[in-house]
């Protein structure tokens, strides 16, 4: 069986800047590339799961979302020779203005569709031993619904969520950490993870 980390993008891996219209503005949070490298070396899958409503809102097209995700992979490689094993995104928003994407889908977090897609492609993933990392209440709910452990990070919107100023948490997260690199360090030290990470 394989353990996966399902990673949100904005506010989790890269600095939250709202809708990123210029690819060059995508900037990694310090330590994220090295943390993903540790997952790569431990044999833990690093899988991006991100809501990207910019397409449905008419801000940009799918090509731009792909370009942003490619830049993310490039920065990870440059900084720490790290990589994401798979990338899933939801471009939908029911109330969007671009008809193609203005649909009620099953992949918009907190719906668990993106994790189900990953599981169909990588059936070895053990969801009960896997983690969802994100900075919003919808990330926490996404993890719970998929049967994973949920981790709320204080980066991005996370601190505001904890303060009750942004979204409301349906259930408390299983863990709260300062940022994604701290989450990876702490989780890899847990007893159940040792056999996977002892080569580090
Ligand atoms: Mg986010
Ligand atoms: Zn969707």
Image: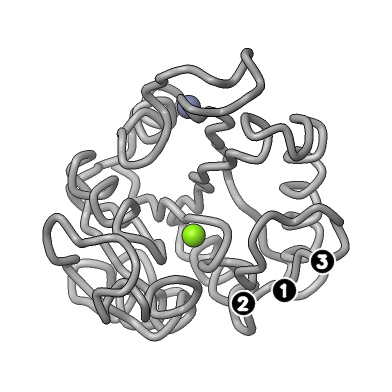
Q: Is mark 3 within 8 Å of ligand 1?
A: no
In the picture, the disc for residue 34 is: 2
Whichever of callouts 1 and 2 sits on the residue coming sooner in the sequence is 2
Whichever of callouts 3 and 2 sits on the residue coming sooner in the sequence is 3
Residue at the spot of label 3? 25
Q: Residue at x 61, y 77 (%)?
A: 34
Q: Percent position (x, y) of residue 171?
A: 11, 59
Q: Does 112 appear above or below 147? A: above
Residues tagged 3 and 1 counted as in contact (Cβ below 8 A): no
Q: CA distance from mark 1 to mark 2?
A: 5 Å
Q: Percent position (x, y) of residue 70?
A: 78, 47
Q: Quadrant of residue 150?
A: bottom left
Q: Residues within 10 Å of mark 2 (few under 14, many from 20)?
A: some
Residues tagged 1 and 2 counted as in contact (Cβ below 8 A): yes
As helix, strand or loop, the secondary structure at mark 3 comes to helix
Task: Please state if 98 lies on the left or on the right of 50 as rendered.
Answer: right
Whichever of callouts 3 and 1 sits on the residue coming sooner in the sequence is 3
The extreme left residue here reads: 171
Residue at the spot of label 1? 80
Q: Residue at x 58, y 31 (%)?
A: 91
């Amino acid at each position: 069986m394989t353990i996966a980390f399902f990673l949100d993008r904005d506010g989790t891996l890269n600095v939250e800047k709202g809708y990123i219209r210029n690819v060059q503005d995508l900037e990694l949070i310090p330590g994220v590339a090295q943390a993903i490298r540790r997952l790569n070396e431990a044999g833990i899958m690093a899988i991006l799961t991100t809501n990207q409503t910019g397409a449905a809102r008419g801000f940009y097209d799918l090509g731009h979302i792909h370009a942003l995700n490619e830049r993310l992979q490039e920065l990870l490689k440059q900084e720490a020779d790290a990589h994401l094993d798979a990338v899933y995104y939801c471009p939908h928003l029911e109330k969007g203005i671009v008809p193609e994407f203005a649909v009620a889908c099953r992949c918009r977090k907190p719906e668990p569709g993106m994790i189900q897609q990953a599981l169909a492609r990588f059936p070895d993933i053990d969801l009960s031993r896997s983690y969802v990392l994100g900075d919003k209440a919808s990330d926490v709910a996404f993890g719970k619904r998929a049967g994973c452990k949920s981790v709320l990070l204080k980066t991005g919107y996370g601190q505001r969520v904890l303060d009750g100023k942004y979204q409301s948490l349906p259930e408390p997260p299983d863990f709260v950490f300062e940022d994604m690199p701290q989450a990876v360090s702490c989780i890899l030290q847990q007893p159940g993870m040792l056999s996977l990470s002892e080569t580090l």
